[in-house]
Image: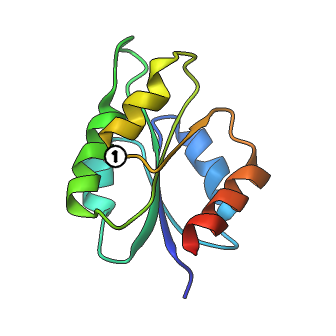
Amino acid sequence: MKPKLLIVDDQVMYGRSLDRALRSDFSIVVASTVQEARQSEDDDLFCALVDIRLDESMPNDRQGLEFVSWLRERKPQIPIVAMSALDEESLEADALKAGATRFLRKPIVISRLKELLQELQK
C-alpha cells in the first residue's frame, strides 16, 4: 500500500501536475480549498503539501498557513511541506512557525520534491 499524500493547492492544474508526478510512489488526494482539505484528512495520511496562498483573489491571503496550524494540532506526527510562489522573505519563517516541517518555493522541482518526500518517510 502506498503512503497517502495530501496536496492542497488552489491552482487545480498545479495540483494535478503534482499528482501525475508523484502517483507512482504515493496515493494522492488533491484539494483546492481548506474545506476540501479538512474533509480529505484522515488517519492514513503520511504527509501534506500545502500552498500558503489558497485564494488568489485576496492579495494577503494566508489560508494555507491556517490549515498548516490546524493540521499540525490534529496530526503532530506527520510532515507538512508548505509551498509558495510568493517571493516574500517572511513566508518560510511564517510557515515553520505555523507548524510546517519544510518550506519549498514554487515552481517545485519534482526531483527535489521526491528526494524530500523519501527523506521524510525515514
Whether residue 66 sits left or right of residue 2 in the image: it is left
Q: Is residue 16 visible?
A: yes
24 vs 75, nearest the viewer:
75
Give the mark count: 1
Question: Is residue 53 at all visible to an observer of this figure?
Answer: no
What is the crowding at mark 1: few (fewer than 14 residues within 10 Å), some, or many (at least 20)?
Answer: many
Q: Locate residue 57, reporting x and y percent.
A: 39, 15
Image quadrant in which the N terminus is located: bottom right
Picture quarter containing residue 41? bottom left
Q: To which residue does mark 1 refer? A: 99
Residue 37 lies, with reference to residue 92, above or below; the image says below
Q: Position of residue 47 (x, y in %)?
A: 46, 63
Residue 102 image position (x, y, % from top left): 51, 46
Q: Position of residue 112 (x, y in %)?
A: 74, 51
Name the residue: 70% across, 73% down: 24
Residue at 60 percent of width and 40 percent of height: 13
Looking at the image, residue 32 sits to the left or right of residue 105; the answer is left
Q: Is residue 51 left or right of residue 60?
A: right
Residue drawn at (56%, 72%), measured in percent from left and top? 121
Compared with residue 68, is residue 114 higher up or lower down, i.e. above or below? below
